[in-house]
Image (cartoon, rainbow, N blue to C red):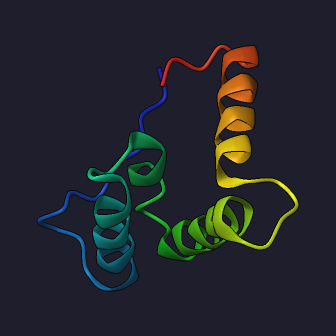
Amino acid sequence: MPYIQQVSDADATGDAKRELDLSAKRAGRVWNIVRIMTPNPAVLRASMQLYKAIMYGESPLSRAQREMLAVVVSRQNDCVY
């Protein structure tokens, strides 16, 4: 089974720490999908920017509709989170 070394909250610095802190503030915790990107802070930052644009940016869809679509896609993909 593949293993990716993740950066803990205590060891995070710079961009990784900033993104972990923002993630915890936004969601009340740091989800594994976020933490798994901590070894590459540039990827983590870009992923969070994309997420925020999709979920909070200007759109003809309401926030609730976006969340419902995320749930449906996750279910279709057999995601357990």
Q: Position of residue 21 (x, y in %)?
A: 28, 71
- Give above or below for 66 relative to 2: below
Q: Where is residue 9 in the image (x, y as percent from the top left)?
A: 18, 62
Q: Position of residue 32 (x, y in %)?
A: 39, 41
- Give above or below for 43 relative to 64: below
Q: Residue at x 38, y 52 (%)?
A: 35
Q: Which picture quadrant has residue 18?
A: bottom left
Q: Which picture quadrant has residue 8?
A: bottom left
- Give above or below for 56 relative to 73: below
Residue occupying the far right of the picture:
60
Left or right of residue 39: residue 29: left
Front residue (pair 76, 36): 76
Q: Position of residue 15 (x, y in %)?
A: 39, 82
Left or right of residue 13: residue 22: right
Front residue (pair 12, 56): 56
Front residue (pair 9, 64): 64
Q: Which residue is drawn at 73% across and 42% down?
A: 65
- Give above or below for 50 relative to 36: below
Residue occupying the far left of the picture:
10
